[in-house]
Amino acid sequence: MIRPWKRFVALMDRREGGEALAALRIGLGLAALSAALDVWPVADLIWLDAELGGYRKLNDPEGLIGWLGGASASTLHGLMAVTVVCALLMVVGVVPRLAALVYLQVHMALTNLNGHAGGSYDELLDNALWLMVFACSHATWSLTCRLRTGKWSNPDAQVLAWPRYLMVLQLVIVYASTGYQKVSSHWLPGGDLGALYYILQQPSWSRHGDMSWLAWLFPVTQAMTLGVWLFEIGAPLLLVALWARSSRTTAGPLRRWMNRVRFRDLFGLFGVGMHIGIWSLMSVGPFSAISLAMYPALWHADEWRRLSARVAGWRRRRQTPSPPAATAPRAG
C-alpha cells in the first residue's frame, strides 16, 4: 500500500504538456494589463496623499514605496509603467516568472497605499500571479519558445502540473467561500431570490444607470440568482469531476455519472456566461477578467493541444485556394 506522503510527492512531480500553463500565462497577462491600464488614469487620485492631489490623507508608505522615497507622482507613474511592461512580458512569454514576481510586488505596494480603494479582486490577482512565479509557463506558445526552437509551439515540452492544480483550487475556494456567505433571504431558496435584481438597481453596481425596467423580468433575475448561488456552493464538486475524469478508466457509478454529464465542461460554460453577464451589467472592476483568466486551468494540456491543432487546420483550409472547377469539353 502506497503511503499518503508518497502519493503527494508523486502528485507534485506529475508532468504534462505546457499548453495549459501557457494559456494561463497569456490570460493572466492580459488581465493584469487591463487592470493596470484601467486604473492608471485615476492613479494619482487613489494613491497620492491629499497634499499631492489625492482624495484622502494616506498613511506613510512602507516597503517598496518607502524605499523609493515615498509616493510621489513620478514614482507612482514609474511603477505603473513597470506593471504594464511586466504584463506584456507575461503575454509574449519572456521571463514570465520574473515578470509575474515584479508585477506582484509592485501591485501589492500600490494597493497597500490606500486600503479604501480596490477590492477582493486585487488579492485574487496577487494569488494568481504568485502561482505563476512557480509555473513554467513559457515552454510553448511564447516568444521564448520561438527563439529556442524556431517555432511558437513545442508539443514535446513537459512541465510540472501542480501550479495548474492549485489554480483550480484557488478558483473553487473563491466561488465556494462567496457562495457560503450568501445567507440572506434574497439569495437562499425559500426567499424572494431578488438579490441580482436589487443589486442592479444600485447605482454603485449597475453599469448602465437606471435599470428599473428589469421589473417585468423579475422571474428571470430570480432564476439567475438561484443559478449563481447553486453554481458557487457547488464549486467543490468541480474537484470531484476532475478526479473522476483523471481516473475514468476505473469503475464506479460516481465517476461514470460525472464523466457522462461532463460536469467540468458545464461548470466552465456556466462560469464563462456568468462572468460575461457580470461584466456587461455591473461595475465590479477587473474581477471578471481575472476570474476568466484562471479558467484555462480547467482543461488538460492535451485538450489545449487538440484545440490548437483544430484551429491550425481550420486556418490552413481557409488559406488553401480551392482547385478550379473542371469544365466539360465542348462538343465538336
Image (cartoon, rainbow, N blue to C red):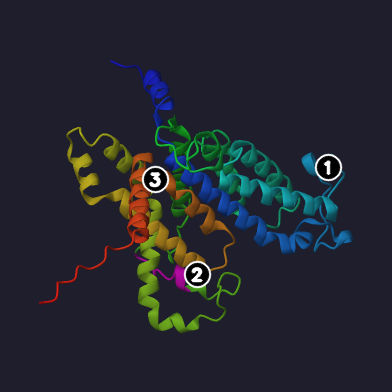
- What residue sits 50% from the left and 69% below the top? 280
Examine the image and state in which quarter residue 218 appears.
Answer: bottom left
Q: Give the secondary structure at mark 2.
A: helix
Q: CA distance from mark 1 to mark 3?
A: 40 Å
- What residue sits 78% from the left and 50% below the top? 78
Q: CA distance from mark 2 to mark 3?
A: 24 Å
Examine the image and state in which quarter residue 153 appears.
Answer: top left
The residue under label 3 is 298
Q: Give the secondary structure at mark 3.
A: helix
Q: Are marks 2 and 1 in contact (CB under 8 Å)?
A: no
* On-image quarter of the C terminus: bottom left
Dot placed on the residue nearer the N-terminal end, 2 or 3: 2
Looking at the rendered structure, which numbered label has been put on residue 280?
A: 2
Q: CA distance from mark 2 to mark 1?
A: 38 Å
Q: Which residues are magenta?
A: 190-197
Can residue 188 be seen from the camera position used here? no
At label 1, which amino acid type do we have? Gly
- What residue sits 48% from the left and 35% below the top? 163
- What residue sits 61% from the left and 71% below the top? 204
Q: Is residue 196 magenta?
A: yes
Q: Position of residue 119 (x, y in %)?
A: 62, 55
The residue under label 1 is 66
Local crowd size for mark 1, using a 10 Å CA cut-off: few (<14), some (14–19), many (≥20): few
Q: Please identify the dominant SS of the magenta region.
A: loop
Q: Could you say which is closer to the camera, residue 325 or residue 102?
A: 325
